Amino acid sequence: MGQNKWGPALLSAAILGTLAAGCGSSSEQAANSPSTGASSAASASTAPAEPSKPVKLEIIQNASGLPAADKDFIKQDLDKALNVDINMTAYAAGDDYKNQLNVRMASGNFPDLFGVDKAAIKQYIQQGLLLDLTPYLDKELKPVKDFIGVDSIKKATFDGKVYAIAKAPTIPYSTFWIRKDWLDKLKLQTPATYDELLAVSKAFTEQDPDGNGKKDTFGLTGGKLGTFAPFFGGYGVGYFAEFYVKDGKIVNSLYEPGMKDALTMINKFIASGSVDPELMANTGTQHLEKAIKGQAGIIYTDWASIAKDQPMEQIKKVNPNAQWVQLAPPKGPAGAIESSFDIGNAGALFALPKTLEKDPVKLKKVFELLNYVSGKEGSQLVQFGQKGKHFNLEGEKVVPTELMGKEAGYTWLYQFTGRPELSYLQVKFAPQSGYIDFANKQERIKALNGFLISPDGYNHADAIRFIEEEFTKFAYGKRPISEYDAFLKTLETTMNYKTLLDSAQKQLQALGYGK
């Protein structure tokens, strides 16, 4: 959850994480020859007999919340349905998981199914350790392919071959939220443009909206520069450093004319004195805490962080009269566009070791598991729990029982191919369904960075650090916008950004995007 966060701490994951060379990044180099894929398909075409004993399957991933095996009813139901014995290990710490996976892959002690990022995929492909799934997609894995869709297949495609299963697409969660009770107290209209939003932000700072006689409120808060995410859409650009298709061509937001205008407007807001003075120091949930405490009247965040039961209870405890409502994106020259959403980002990627080619019984069981959680019965199990206990069906409608919220909070760990995001959320979070629908329906630029890999000769971490630093200077008036072109030139030369621009064009065109 919590998408479209644009602060420095979240940039790699939310915007350009798929380009990085480390954890959570993306890379592509195929290691298998065409003949390897052909032999893989041939070996799988002869289905092995059903084994007499359950087949042991070991699965590892970077996650938390897995119950003990004797309490894990999802494992028990999957084991029974598929004649398997699943042993899953979930590592809560990302670095711990990455280290454990690298050790196991290097020693030849391969899990049967494991979570990967694109950097890991690149490394393991070069080492010849991953199973090429391409020959299986139209037959053995057809239910998976149909469930996750063509775009998700592209997320794990490397030089025309597919080396992992990407989860089904997610949906956007984030919007502006505003204190309606403060608007009413100050007799202000709901802002619909940037200038109106600025006027409200200043009023929240200067006109004592909480009525305590103290100047202890400000207008706008959020997670670092991610606070201003919707400012870009109104000027027709995505986040900085995002690629997308415009007028049939692949463009990069850094080079769009509207980027300078967006930065100028952000600078105008900050210069007004109505923005959280600790904006760039906010980490974790500090901006949310300020909103809950009544220190700020506008916040950019995801619905889950402010509208789920727990934060709503906190808000009401501090101020029973507080009324937070979603705010449509301000209308700019390009319209009312809620920034961007990266359709290339995968919630997770799961790969299989190449050695499973030599174990057709186990390979078949892994495929059966992936297909089962992609089908109606299995998907409902890993989304909602056990039918008749955690949910019931009224026709095709899933109706939760009280036990779903109490016992089925961990089932997402078994959603190896994802879930139908909108319908899932509306069942799991029925009281928040209106907020979910509102965030999902806002117009957004479709960014494509999640499909990309980091080309040789381009250091993603250094480039992102430089972009963050310079954008912060532009936003806070430490560097005039007249020097923006000079910033781009330095980016292209010192940071070798031109290499990325050229590579992105080729990669995205190969996947069918742009001209």
Image (cartoon, rainbow, N blue to C red):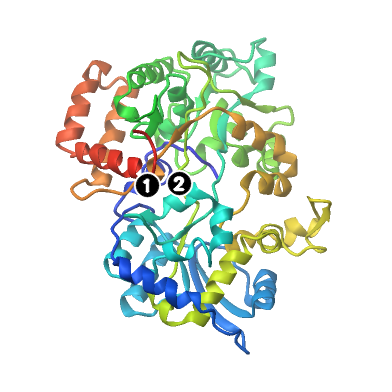
Quadrant of the rendering where the C terminus is positioned: top left
Instruction: Decide if residue 481 is on the left or right side of residue 152.
Output: left
SS of the residue at dot 2?
loop
Amino acid type assigned to the residue bearing label 2 in the image? Asn
Check the image and report above or below for 156 versus 277: below
First along the sequence among labels 1 and 2: 1
Residue in the picture at 53% in, 67% down? 140
**Residue 410 in view:** no
The residue at which mark 2 appears reads as 345
Q: Disc 1 vs disc 2: which is toward the camera?
A: 2
- Compared with 236, 126 (above or below) is below
**Residue type highlighted by circle 1:** Gly
- Find residue 322 and name its label: none
Gap in Å between the C-alphas at discs 1 and 2? 9 Å
Q: Give the camera-side residue of 225 and 372.
A: 372
Q: Which label number is shown at residue 17?
A: 1
User: On the image, which quarter does residue 135 sit in?
Assistant: bottom left
